[in-house]
Image: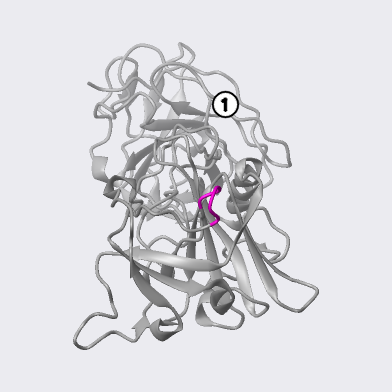
Amino acid sequence: MIERVSCHSAAEATADGGGVPGSQRDSRAGGSMSESRSGGGETEREPEEQRGGSGSAGGGGGMAVVGDLPVPQNICISNITCDSFRIRWDMTEEGRERITHFFIDLNKKENQGSNKFKHKDVPTKLVAKAVPLPMTVRGHWFLSPRTEYTVSVQTAAKKPDGEYDVSQWSEIVQFCTADYSLLHLNQLLQKAELVSGRMLPFSVFYRNQQESLLDRETPQRHLVPAVKDDSGSHGSPISGKLRGIFFSCNTEFNTGEPPQDSPYGPYRFQIRADLLFNRHTNIYFGDFYCMYTSYHYVILVLAPAGSGGDAFCRGRLPLLDRSDNGFLTCRADADGSLSFRHAQDVILEVIYTEPVDLTLGSVTRVSGHQLMSLSTANAKKDPSCKVCNISAGR
């Protein structure tokens, strides 16, 4: 099936020259969607329609390929974010005065053939009035973070009868959208704060695992940081990049102790909270997500000040006040000792960025059940959840 181009405005274009940007639209099947933003140089969208037939470059059904319209060349993609990019290209002068619109064919890389059948929520073609280049294409409903796309462009001239003459398509270029920025992570943080609940005391961090590291013939003396998996938000800047050690700290509200059950194996390494979280530790917000369930997860990063992990997180993740935040706190009591609290209504996944000496803790066997179905290893976030998603991809 070839997708029609006759849909309403949804993409944004920002002209970086002296002209006034025109309208842009998202050629998604089935209805319109637009996004209202204020600020200088942004577009004023108008409904437009290409009538009669397919959007294929081969013409027919209302579009004809002509030789007097310049073909875009040397396409350049820049200023890439998780839900926008800037695009420019070169054109010859001949036929330039006829151009009224640009058609931008945008596809996820795995769907490189343009104009093939797609889910109705995934657009194929964006239509923009001709504006001075470069222009910005923005739209969280068709651009996802950390995703490879292909893009090609053709120029078009709208005729008095409403049909279009179009140029040949340009060459295809590839680009990859970026991770969430601090702005997006702060939006996630604000959403997570709404559901974190009251704070409960705890005294140890623990991690469940398949084997007892202290029972080997040649025991391992340290837990070593490993690259974080792809669980959580697709745009998270720590997935596949940050090195750390996974810990939990949630307790059972009726006992104040770690839960008896384990999603990750029969053994549990346990260490005093003050050995990982103290006055010399920075705490960062990393992510907020769920897995098609009613309960939510918050990822926090603990990084000793000045460490490599701290350097990675600084500027990428929101820094929290260690003594006053809605998830995990460390406070000094009157006698100088430290007390710790965790949020009750979210499941905390704590990543410690440096090696941990196993002799500082202890290993025990979990007394309850092994609930492997509750593991979050490489878990994918529910993109439809209104509690933990923001309008910048999933």
Indicate the position of residue 73 as horizontal and vertical percent values: 38, 50
Q: Give percent across and percent down for residue 243.
A: 41, 72
Q: Main secondary structure of the magenta part?
A: loop
Q: Which residues are magenta?
A: 252-256
Q: In the drawing, does residue 114 fall left or right of residue 146?
A: left
Q: Is residue 277 magenta?
A: no
**Quadrant (top left/top right/bottom left/bottom right) for the C terminus:** top left
Residue 259 occupies which quadrant of the picture?
A: bottom left
Residue 360, position as x, y percentages in the image: 46, 83
In the figure, is residue 26 to the left or right of 307?
Answer: left
Q: Quadrant of residue 331?
A: bottom right
Q: Position of residue 381 (x, y in %)?
A: 41, 43
- For image coordinates 30% across by 19% down, the residue present is 54
Query: Magenta segment: does it hold 255?
Result: yes
Q: Residue 129 versus residue 12: which sits nearer the camera?
A: 12
Say if 167 sits above or below 251 in the image: above
* Residue that carries the numbered disc 1 in the rendered image: 34
The answer to which of 43 and 91 lies nearer the viewer is 43
Does the rendering let one see residue 85?
Answer: no
Q: Residue, x 76% and y 71% (percent of image)?
A: 333
Can you see residue 294?
yes
Q: Residue at x 33, y 24 (%)?
A: 55
Q: Nearer the viewer, residue 243 or 224?
A: 224
**Total marks drawn?**
1
Q: Residue furthest left?
A: 217
In the rendered view of the protein, which quadrant contains the N terminus? top left
Give the SS element for disc 1. Answer: loop
Q: Amino acid at mark 1?
A: Ser
